[in-house]
């Protein structure tokens, strides 16, 4: 008598898969959260650009996110829930810098800067160990300095007051520049809530 073979139930969520600029990417499950790019018939580890991470938001369905985030710790899941286009980037930051999550939850706009540190600092690849070391050394202010932002209470308060922390990469350089200008600090520090219009007007000063 032949027995029907049954596949064991899979308790590991499927990888998140998406495409960007003609390339296929996937994010492996938490806590490794390894990002891979397809090369022929193989999937190889890859350090994607922030644009590639943001492209996932356009393709991934709410159901795909729910299944994937089911295996992520509650605190991290609540943290990344603040983001839409930067959700995968925020998840990568949380996976590489777990001690930083509490600070980023209080100042979510800082997440986009941390995710884009390769571009902002002009390095050839990610420097997550350096970022972790900076946070261990001096907390949020050391992270601000490492990212090229003014390590001041005013700049931290401004970032906390951004209504939409899901910052686009194109805004990061301009916002960083304006935070170094007294007129920029004055224009933004007096606002209890900084919306897209106020942020765009202030960043125009940096052009």
Image (cartoon, rainbow, N blue to C red):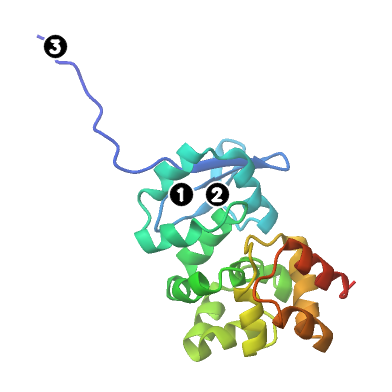
Residue drawn where x is 71% and y is 82% of the image: 190
Residue drawn where x is 56% and y is 40% of the image: 60
User: Mark 2 or 1 closer to N-term?
Assistant: 1
Element carrying mark 3: loop
Q: What is the residue that sits farthest to the right in this orientation?
A: 207
Closer to the camera in the image, 120 or 46: 120
User: Mark 2 or 3 closer to N-term?
Assistant: 3
State the separation of the CA atoms marked 2 and 1: 8 Å
Residues packed near mark 2 inside 10 Å, few (<14), some (14 to 19) or many (20 plus): some
Residue located beneath label 3 in the image: 2
Q: Is residue 110 above or below residue 46?
A: below
Residue located beneath label 1 in the image: 28
Q: Are marks 2 and 1 in contact (CB under 8 Å)?
A: yes
State the separation of the CA atoms marked 1 and 3: 37 Å
**Image location (x, y in percent) of residue 103:** 49, 76
- Please state, as top left, top right, bottom left or bottom right, where the N terminus lies in the image: top left
Mark 2 vs mark 3, foreground winner is 2
Residues packed near mark 1 inside 10 Å, few (<14), some (14 to 19) or many (20 plus): some
Q: Is residue 156 above or below residue 49?
A: below
With 62 as the anchor, is 198 left or right in this view? right
User: Mark 1 or 3 closer to N-term?
Assistant: 3
Residues packed near mark 3 inside 10 Å, few (<14), some (14 to 19) or many (20 plus): few
Q: What is the residue that sits farthest to the top in this orientation?
A: 1
Element carrying mark 1: loop
């Amino acid at each position: 008598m032949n027995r029907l073979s049954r596949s064991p139930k899979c308790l590991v969520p499927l990888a998140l898969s998406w495409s960007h600029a003609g390339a296929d990417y996937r994010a492996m499950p938490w806590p490794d959260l390894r990002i891979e790019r397809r090369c022929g018939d193989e999937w190889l580890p890859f350090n994607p650009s922030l644009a590639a991470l943001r492209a996932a938001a356009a393709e991934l369905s709410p159901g795909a996110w729910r299944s994937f985030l089911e295996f992520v710790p509650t605190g991290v899941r609540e943290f990344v829930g603040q983001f839409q286009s930067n959700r995968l980037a925020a998840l990568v930051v949380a996976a590489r810098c777990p001690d930083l999550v509490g600070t980023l939850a209080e100042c979510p706009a800082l997440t986009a800067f941390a995710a884009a540190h390769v571009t902002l600092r002009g390095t050839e690849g990610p420097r997550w160990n350096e970022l972790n070391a900076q946070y261990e050394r001096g907390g949020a202010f050391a992270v601000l300095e490492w990212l090229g932002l003014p390590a001041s209470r005013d700049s931290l308060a401004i970032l906390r007051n951004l209504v939409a922390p899901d910052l686009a990469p194109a805004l990061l350089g301009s916002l960083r520049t304006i935070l170094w200008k007294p007129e920029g600090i004055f224009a933004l520090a007096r606002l209890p809530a900084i919306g897209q219009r106020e942020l765009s007007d202030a960043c125009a000063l940096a052009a």
